[in-house]
C-alpha cells in the first residue's frame, strides 16, 4: 500500500523550513518534473502533482501549522484524528485517505493482482493536468500589482466534438466487453481457495466506452493543443518565487472532471536604486561633509513619491534612518514594510588649490575637540604605549 509521502520530503526540505526555502524548493522541483520537460513521463507527471500539492499546504501558514502538528490528518478533510473518520482509530494504519481501496491494494499485492491501483475504474470524472508558467515582472509591478496577458501553449477542449472525442453526429458507445464498467473479472483457483480478480478492460482502456467514429480534429482524444492568452492579475507584494494559482485554467478534465489549475511562478527584475528584503526596502543616499556636519533636509525617493527627511547635525557615515510604512505591502495582509535609508559620506576627489586651502583652514579652525571619536581613539593609543 503506497502511503502519501511527507510534504517536506517531497520538496527535499527539513521540517521547520522557512517561507523562502519552501518557495525555492518548490520552484526547483516543479521545474524538474514539469510535464513540458518530461513529455510522456507518467512518473514525472505524478511527481509534479505531488510537488504542487505539497506547496499548496506548506505555503499557507495556517495549513502548514496544522500539518506540522498533525501531519496529513491535519489537512485532509477525509482523515480522522484517532478513531474518527476513515480508519484513523487503528493506529494510523489506514488514515482515511485511501479507505477500502487501500485494503484492496494490499490483497491485490498478496495474490498477484486483482484490486491494485492499475485496475481501478477509469471511467469516472478525472481532473485535468495542472499547468505551470514562469512570468517576469518589473520591481514596480511586483510592488503595486499588475494585470498581465499570459500566453500559453496547452491542451484545450476540442471545439469540433466539444470534448467527447466522437465525430459530430455520432456518440460514444458502451463497451460490449466490460458492459461499461471498464473492468473485466476472472476467477482463479489457489491453494487458499477460489479468488476472483479484476483487471482493466483492454478494449476500452478502462473507460467503459468506445468511440466507433473518432473526431477528425482531435483524433478521438477530445482535446487539441493550442496557443491561448489568459489575463492574470498579479497581486501587489509578490516577490521572487511567489506563486499565483488560478483555478480551472489548466488543461481540461476527462469524463466531466474539472479542469486543472494554472500556477504562475513570479520572477522580479532588480531595481536601480532599491534592494528588497521581505517587505522592507533599503536605499543608500550620498551626502556631503557639510550636510553630515551641519544637518540638512534631504530628498528621499520612495517607490511612489519623493519625501523630505531631516538628517541631524553630526550624522556619522553609514547611519541608517527608517521611514515607516514606505516599503512594500505584504501580499497576504496588505501591511506595508519600511524603507531604510543609509547615508554614505562622499569625499570630494577633484579640488582646486583654493578649495584645498579652504579645507586646510577649516581643519585648523575645528580642532581635535570637535572629533570625539578621533580624540577617544588617540587617548586609547596613548594609554597602550605609555
Image (tube, helix red, strand yellow):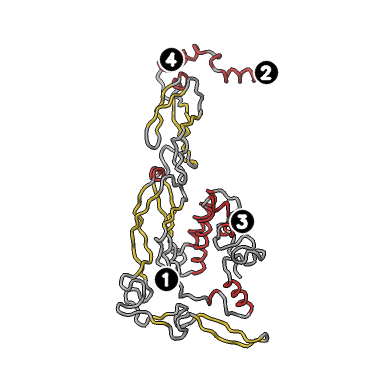
Q: Image quarter for residue 209?
A: bottom left
Q: Residue furthest front?
A: 84
Give the residue drawn at x 45%, y 77%. Answer: 207
Mark toward the start of the polypeptide (2 vs 1):
1
Give the residue drawn at x 61%, y 65%. Answer: 95
Mark toward the start of the polypeptide (3 vs 4):
3
Circles 1, 3 touching at the beta carbon (< 8 Å): no
Q: Residue furthest bottom?
A: 189
Q: Nearer the viewer, mark 1 or mark 4?
A: 1
Give the residue drawn at x 37%, y 31%. Answer: 306
The residue under label 3 is 70
Q: Is residue 197 left or right of residue 233?
A: right
Q: Nearer the viewer, mark 3 or mark 4?
A: 3
Q: Say what secondary structure mark 2 lies in.
A: helix
The residue under label 4 is 358
Which quadrant holds the N terminus? bottom right
The residue under label 1 is 254
Mark toward the start of the polypeptide (1 vs 4):
1
Q: CA distance from mark 3 to mark 4?
A: 73 Å
Mark toward the start of the polypeptide (4 vs 2):
4
Q: CA distance from mark 2 to mark 1?
A: 85 Å
Q: 345 or 273: which is nearer to us?
A: 273
Mark toward the start of the polypeptide (1 vs 3):
3
Q: Say what secondary structure mark 3 lies in.
A: helix
Q: Is residue 93 left or right of residue 313?
A: right
Q: Image quarter for residue 220?
A: bottom left
Which quadrant holds the C terminus? top right
Q: Nearer the viewer, mark 2 or mark 1?
A: 1
Q: CA distance from mark 2 to mark 3?
A: 63 Å
The residue under label 2 is 383
Circles 3, 4 touching at the beta carbon (< 8 Å): no
Amino acid at each position: 500500500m503506497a502511503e502519501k509521502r511527507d510534504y517536506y520530503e517531497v520538496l527535499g526540505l527539513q521540517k521547520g523550513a522557512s517561507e523562502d526555502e519552501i518557495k525555492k524548493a518548490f520552484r526547483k522541483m516543479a521545474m524538474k518534473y514539469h510535464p513540458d520537460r518530461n513529455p510522456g513521463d507518467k512518473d514525472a507527471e505524478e511527481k509534479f502533482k505531488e510537488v504542487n500539492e505539497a506547496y499548496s499546504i506548506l505555503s499557507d501558514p495556517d495549513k502548514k501549522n496544522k500539518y506540522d502538528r498533525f501531519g496529513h490528518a491535519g489537512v485532509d478533510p477525509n482523515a480522522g484524528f484517532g478513531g474518527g473518520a476513515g480508519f484513523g482509530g487503528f493506529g494510523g494504519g489506514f488514515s482515511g485517505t485511501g479507505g477500502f481501496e487501500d485494503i484492496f491494494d494490499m490483497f491485490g499485492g498478496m495474490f498477484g493482482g486483482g484490486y491494485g491501483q492499475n485496475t481501478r475504474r477509469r471511467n469516472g470524472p478525472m481532473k485535468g493536468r495542472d499547468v505551470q508558467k514562469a512570468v517576469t515582472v518589473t520591481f514596480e509591478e511586483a510592488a503595486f500589482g499588475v494585470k498581465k496577458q499570459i500566453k500559453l501553449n496547452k491542451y484545450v477542449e476540442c471545439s469540433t466534438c466539444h470534448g467527447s472525442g466522437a465525430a459530430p453526429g455520432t456518440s460514444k458507445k458502451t463497451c460490449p466487453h466490460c458492459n461499461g464498467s471498464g473492468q473485466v473479472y476472472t476467477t482463479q483457483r489457489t491453494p487458499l481457495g477460489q479468488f476472483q480478480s479484476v483487471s482493466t478492460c483492454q478494449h476500452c482502456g478502462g473507460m467503459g466506452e468506445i468511440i466507433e467514429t473518432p473526431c477528425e480534429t482531435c483524433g478521438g482524444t477530445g482535446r487539441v493543443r493550442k496557443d491561448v492568452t489568459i489575463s492574470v492579475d498579479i497581486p501587489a507584494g509578490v516577490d521572487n518565487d511567489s506563486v499565483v494559482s488560478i483555478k480551472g485554467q489548466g488543461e481540461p478534465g476527462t469524463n466531466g472532471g474539472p479542469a486543472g489549475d494554472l500556477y504562475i511562478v513570479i520572477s522580479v527584475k532588480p531595481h536601480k536604486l532599491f534592494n528588497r528584503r521581505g517587505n522592507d526596502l533599503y536605499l543608500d543616499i550620498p551626502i556631503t561633509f557639510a550636510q553630515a556636519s551641519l544637518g540638512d533636509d534631504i530628498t528621499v525617493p520612495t517607490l511612489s513619491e519623493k519625501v523630505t527627511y531631516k538628517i541631524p547635525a553630526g550624522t556619522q557615515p553609514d547611519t541608517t534612518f527608517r521611514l515607516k510604512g514606505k516599503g512594500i505591502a505584504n501580499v497576504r495582509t496588505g501591511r506595508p514594510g519600511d524603507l531604510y535609508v543609509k547615508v554614505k559620506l562622499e569625499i570630494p576627489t577633484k579640488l582646486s588649490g583654493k578649495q584645498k586651502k579652504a579645507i586646510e583652514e577649516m581643519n585648523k579652525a575645528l580642532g581635535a575637540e570637535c572629533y570625539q571619536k578621533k580624540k577617544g581613539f588617540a587617548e586609547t593609543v596613548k594609554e597602550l604605549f605609555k
